[in-house]
Amino acid sequence: MKLIRRSLIGASTAFVIALAVSTGCGKNREASSGTAGTSGTSATSAPSAWEGEVRSREAQIDKVIADNRQSFDAFDSGSLGDATLEMIPFVVFRALQDLEPAVLSDTALNSAGFFPRADSASGHNGITWTRPTAPDKTFALRYMTRTCASCHTGRVRLADGTMRLTRGGANTEINLHRFIGNLTAMLKTNLAASADASEYQAFRKRILDALASKPSDWYFGPNARNVSPDDAAKEVATVTANIDAVLARMRVMNNQRLGGFALLQSHSYAHAPNAPSLVDGAPGLVETSGLGSTSLVRVVGADKADAVLPPGPSKADIPAVWMIDPTGYANWDGTIRGFARSLTSSLAVVGDPSKIDIPTNALIQNFLGKLPAEPYPFAVDMAARTRGEATFRANCSGCHTTAAGRSRNDLVFDVGTDPLRAEAIRPLAVGVMGKLITSICPASQPECSFDAQGPVVDPSSRRGYVAGPLHGVWAVAPYLHNGSVPTLRQLLVPSLRTDAPFLRGSVTYNQKDGGWEWEPSKEGELRARGDTALALHDPRQAGFAPGGHGSATNQTIVDGQGKSVHMAWSDSAADRATVDDLIAYLLSL
């Protein structure tokens, strides 16, 4: 079952700018809306066997976090380095929340998937600030940045309506392309082409007036750690005294990001029929490979741009990162190894490779290998689970097994799914990317040991997608690498799939079929429940085909053990019972 899963320091800044929308957990188990039982059981009733298992697994998660508190905090709420792609001072970001509410207000951030969290200093999942940093060795400020949790902590609505965090899972609500599209458009308009423009002067005045009007304890909030009101007042004074330099740097960064989008658009997207948007789209999807490759053009030359850029759109679903192999193959196509995965994800946020916090990233990488998957928080039919496990072992375990110790060719399969993401990393790009990573993280640093195969692997001899273990697979819907199959049932029964647009971004779970609610007809009902990040995903767009992993006429495959096994079933009454049982087992993983 294919369910689970991107010159040189001189060019690396551009590489990072291009990774702008790449990928990349509460200290309390529940999100800000309250506390709930595992599946709605009252406090006085005896737990079922499944509820007892869930509580045991939750206790294990809590112990791993407690035993690795520094690493968990770095993952959940820490800065990955001392710079950002936007270089927006945090005090300016806070002012812009009032000045540009369509893009940065609490409501706008929630709808972009930075969902509210009472235990977060910023009030939102995935948003924090850097340590004081001085770009170009000038004035030091804290800058707004994203955490690992922005993409890799999601949430689910429980039976009683409260929310539970899925730490290390996929944030199905995060809509980075839309958020960055709106942010870059707003900044381009307001920063204009130069400080002489009237738009710039008006923007400058609005920011200065806002900074002068707020009390110093407003900027970093009551939950701020290590930032006192006096510290905030000093940062406001620094920005005020250097406002033109601050805004000029923001303009440079914004223009570089827009340049990366334009390059990818012209080479990889413009020629694809019905291409998705780079500055909009549905939540939970990111264009990491293409945007990461745009900077390599500076190294190889414009005449070789097509040799390093993807042949077409390669947006992909955000994966879970719990229980990853810290030294193994990563990403959908298995082309990044070990610590390189963490570095490329951090580059997509930090911007300046010299500002990446290597030790902190190493702590996060090792922690994720220990973090168990969040257990399914609803009821499971234990008899069906047992029957489903037998079906899984007979048909699925030959591909979906532990990844550790397996070669890339044993992990990567072609099961007929959309090929564009698997074709995104070109052979010429591999060597350049490898040199970039080793320049950022040289072998002289203990965290940066890569074997002879190197941090980036050439996929050209075997294109396809990694079939790894399925820990917490319930939480990573929609399925396939491109997130174009809404539920487990549709994955297992291809005749039930749709190529019509469907909703992504719900946190309401469809327990019958195994996946987030997806039907467009339910949008009003879901928004009334509090699903704020909903948007339509169109499987008809380039790169999003929902086919593969079996079809109505081809239900078998030769698995990793050389056996002919089922990877799909029909919707007949006989097969429906088998699929129901298999779903019960998969939900319990």
Image: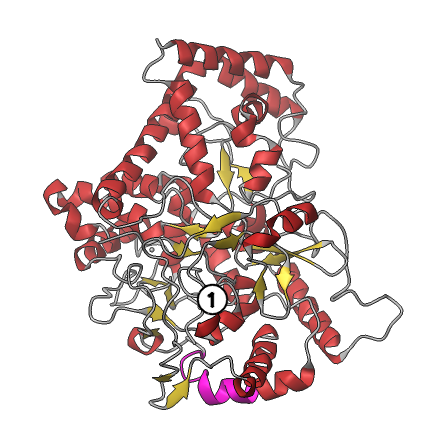
Tell me the quarter of the picture where residue 71 sits.
bottom right
Which quarter of the rendering shows the N terminus? bottom left
Tell me the quarter of the picture where residue 333 sits.
bottom left
> Does residue 333 sit above or below 203 in this rendering?
below
Please say whether residue 396 is one of the residues in the magenta stretch. Answer: yes
Does residue 21 appear anywhere in the picture?
Answer: yes
Q: Residue 263 in the image: x percent, y percent?
A: 24, 39
Please say whether residue 528 is one of the residues in the magenta stretch. Answer: no
Q: Say which amino acid is labelled 1.
A: Ile
Query: Residue at image x 40%, y 31%?
Result: 184
Task: Report whether 150 appears left or right of 259.
Answer: right
Q: Residue 135 in the image: x percent, y percent?
A: 39, 28
Nearest the viewer among 195 and 582 is 582
Task: Report whether 381 appears left or right of 140.
Answer: right
Query: Residue at image x 52%, y 13%?
Result: 206
Query: Residue at image x 28%, y 59%?
Result: 420
Q: Which residues are magenta?
A: 389-401
Q: Residue 117 in the image: x percent, y percent?
A: 66, 44
> Does residue 218 sit above or below 351 in this rendering?
above
